[in-house]
């Protein structure tokens, strides 16, 4: 049985949000690649903690917990420093 239009639209929206979160996190990592290696993960985490609202960080943790392979290696390293929303 095919999902109804509302359910299919919600799935598409969720996939779009996930793709955007991954792209944004990986772009931050790309920027911090110009920094010394010892500062990269902390810089990424600091940026995410300072500028991402809790809902965005929640989505990022869901992605990291389920399919971390989409995230840049430095983003994955930074996740231990990112504040998990409660």
Image (tube, rainbow, N blue to C red):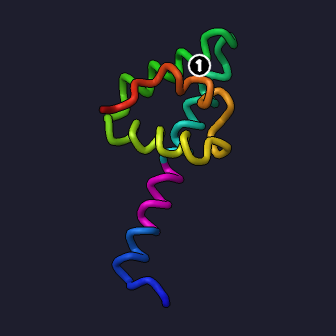
Taking the spot 44% from the left edge, 83% from the top edge, the residue there is 3
| Residue at the image position 64 percent from the left and 14 percent from the top | 35
Q: Is residue 41 magenta?
A: no
Q: With 52 as the anchor, is 36 left or right in this view?
A: right
Q: Quadrant of residue 11?
A: bottom left
x and y percent of residue 2 in the render?
Answer: 48, 88
Measured along the vertical axis of the image, is residue 19 above or below residue 57?
A: below
Q: Count the numbered circles shown.
A: 1
Residue interval drawn in magenta: 12-20
Residue placed farthest to the bottom in the image?
1
Give the answer, above or below, for where 43 lies relative to 64: above
Where is residue 37 drawn, in percent x and y? 69, 13
Category of crowding for the residue at label 1, using alpha-carbon neighbours closer than 10 angstroms: few (below 14), some (14–19), many (at least 20): many
According to the picture, the residue beneath numbered tag 1 turns out to be: 41
Side (left or right) of 22 relative to 55: right
Residue 22 lies in what quarter of the image?
top right
């Amino acid at each position: 049985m095919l999902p109804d239009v509302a359910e299919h639209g919600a799935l598409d929206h969720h996939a779009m949000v996930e793709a955007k979160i991954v792209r944004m996190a990986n772009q931050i990592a790309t920027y911090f690649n110009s920094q010394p290696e010892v500062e990269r993960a902390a810089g990424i985490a600091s940026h995410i903690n300072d500028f991402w609202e809790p809902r965005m960080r929640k989505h990022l943790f869901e992605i990291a917990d389920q399919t971390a392979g989409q995230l840049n290696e430095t983003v994955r390293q930074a996740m231990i420093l990112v504040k998990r929303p409660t």
